[in-house]
Amino acid sequence: MRKKRSARRFKNKLPLLLMMIPGLAYFIINNYFPMFGTVLAFKKFNYGKGILGSEWNGLDNFKYLFQTNDAQIMLRNTILYNIAFIVLGTVLSIIVAIAMHEIGKRFIARIFQPVIVMPHLLSWVVVAYIVYAFFNARNGFVNGVLLNGANVSWYSEPKHWPYIITAVYLWKFVGFNSIIYMSSMAGINEELFEAARIDGAGKIKQIFCITLPNIRPTVVILLLMSISKIFNSDFGLFYQIPMQSGLIYSTTQTIDTYVYHALMDLGNVGMSAAASLFQSTVGFVLVIGANWLVRRIDPENTLF
Amino acid sequence: MKKLIAIALVLVLALSVLACVPAQQASESETTVPATEQAEEKKTVYITLLCMNNMPTKEGAQQVQDELNRYLAEDAGKNYQVQIRDFLDLSSHMSGIDLALASGEELGVVLTDFRTGTMAANGQLLPLDPYLDNELAGAKALVGEDWLEAGTFNGEVYGLPVYKGVVCRTYLVCRKDIVDEVGFDVSAIKTIADCEPLFTAVKAAHPEMDCIVPNDVGSLGILLTQYGQSGYRFDFLGNNTYGTDSTGALIGDSKTVVNFYGSDEFAAVCKLAYDWNQKDLMMKEASVSPDTATELFPAGTAFSTIAINATSEETVAQMFGNGAYGTSGEFVAIPLDTQMLTASTLGLQYGIASTCTCPNEAADLMNLIWTDPYVMNLIVYGVEGTDYVVDADGVADWPEGQNVDTVPYTEINLCGAIGNQFNLKLFKGNSSEADLVLMESLIEDAVASSAMGFSFDASNVNTEIAAVQTVIDQYFLPLVNGEVNPDEYLPQFVTALENAGINKIIAEKQAQLDAYWAN
């Protein structure tokens, strides 16, 4: 009897399981197989000897990440920028999403939506040239028009770049990320808002009591996912936007750009594997930690 | 990007391990499939070509390959065929070769991208020694034992240097109309320092103009005017000749490896650049500007640029005038310095990939490219009649109505980057008899460094090199372009280099160099 039921249950779920196969295959091939490559982080890789034949060299491949004073700077930059992006990005995306949600299905929304998503479609190289047009010292818009002919050398003064980079990041991603929140808001039952209106709740009250609590699971999941990437940085943003200007490395260098500069000539597979392994290990620890924290506070919304 | 590629490498490697078939064997079985339909089984030599022109069309490339194979079989009597495996552009060449080798694909003749030593240490190349006195005898006689030493690593030859006008001159190329306007006698200019009165006069007459603009993105090239035979005589010991990755160099006749960036000579270069920057004689923010002479001359905001070339001043001025660099008008080229003959100047080398299954035939092909004018012309200019035509004097030109961008196949910009440049037909507007004579005399009269055959094995100091490189990237360009005060930044630069471990690299280099001289 019981066997029969479980067989039927399996039969019911068979289509779902079959549908899972392509996705599973993708993950196994693209995300799990390559993990064997992490062994390279501990080897002195020789093309002739292959992966398994190459000699072990302990933690030598990791040393260069911590060799210079730059190491602290790039770690600090990576983490602080990511925290700023997570906090400001999430808050602004939600604000934009709420605003768009309030506009609803009016005609104007069809204009706004493409406009706010537009920056996301531009490549970093294009964005870098737009930024360059604003800030270059010879005929830049900021010096020439906004500051009335001032002579600020933006590309050699590190202090401006935390603001510029954060602004560029937000400009590019807020619109796109707000779509996810908008779709989550679209799922909220309209009757809730109606009931609230009848009870005399204003717009602000509705947002805080209905909209935000309803999108909380989405927010938590997205937060957890971005925390797992806190040791990674968007290479295009940090490499292209500052035009690789050396003088502003103190505020623009991140782990990814550091690895690029360090290994550009060497082409050392082991050392780049070490950098990735380091980033993913820290990311893994952080996401487990954050998930644990969420579970302590709000068990329903944990990722796993 | 590099890291992404590295990650991709890891992925590919991991996959090939999991496939449980040694990658080498897998590719061997593939190569028995002939590239073109042939009744008999012939060995196939693969060649990977750098492409610095438009990518050849599929038909154009096929035609060149067919003609090459016809020539090999019918005229040269060879029992193998050639397949041009890939055309890779500059930005993807190095990673393309690394990726192919990492996944065990068969390559044959490859350009080593100025890193023969690194590739040999990584096990990516086969030693050429067994073929030097057999298949490669002709090429060996051509380039000579001295040059081969530049491709030697741990006592074995891995790279065959390209035979070309390796010794280049540095020119100041300026607009003739402006020179005439300010009425300056340029024949009196012998060094970069002599240019200051000229620049001052130009700036006074044309305040909108920058006196020097970059010819290569990011660098004004002031260093390049003072590093050669008539200047400070730097030998970068295998690092590139632009000074952007120096990890210990020789200066003058000294036998002591020093930190190039800490030298008085480098400080003098930075001081001159800073002085001119303060006097507004050079383009500001050149380190970050994407603009080069190609855009700035036509825009009318540039007076001169610094160019490196192996040809005569007349040809250089012509090249700037006839659109080869995207510029037009009348130019004057003033020679300022001539490069030293060092391992760095001979860094353009070809080798045989470690995955090659027929190294004898690959070596034979290399020998043909270096010694047989027909093969050399075929690879660089394509097929006569379709890709280029030859006039009564034997000078090549584009076919009627065609140009460099429209012919099906041309590798004309590869003329000095493969084989033997002196075997090429003269090409209208690109080379002249006088240039070849000059190139040969430059090689003959070149001041050769005492460490010309030295190649550095960096495998013990990879960590330090990686760390040092990030420091160089940070300070080098702003200093050498005169954007920051050397009194303030140069000491910071040197301290940062020392913290990153440059002294360890220098000590290692010195030890290897002493051992090299002792032999």
Image: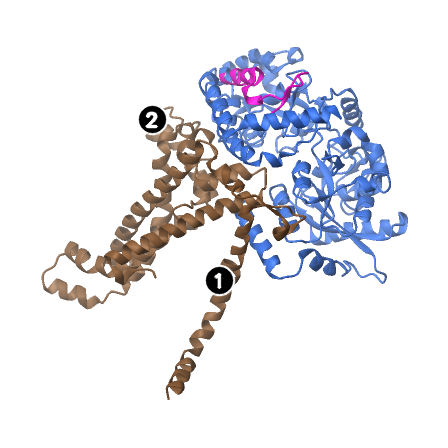
Chain colours: A brown, B blue
Residue B262 is inside the magenta segment: yes
What residue sits right under mark 1 in the picture? A27
| In magenta stretch: residue B167 | no
Residue positioned 34% across, 49% down in the render: A174
Residue sitting at 71 percent across and 30 percent down? B346
Residue to which mark 2 is pinned: A148
Compute the Cα span from label 2 to label 1. 55 Å
Q: Is residue B222 above or below residue A200?
A: above
In the image, residue B410 above or below residue B302: below
Q: Residue B255: where, in percent of width, then height?
A: 67, 18
Q: Residues within 10 Å of mark 1 (few under 14, many from 20)?
A: few
Image quarter where the C terminus of chain A lies is bottom left
Q: Amino acid at mark 1?
A: Phe
The amino acid on which the numbered mark 2 sits, given as a three-letter code, is Asn
Q: Is residue B290 above or below residue A231?
A: above
Q: Please tell me which residue is depicted at 82% across the width and 52% down the height of the picture.
A: B69
Give the residues in magenta: B248-274
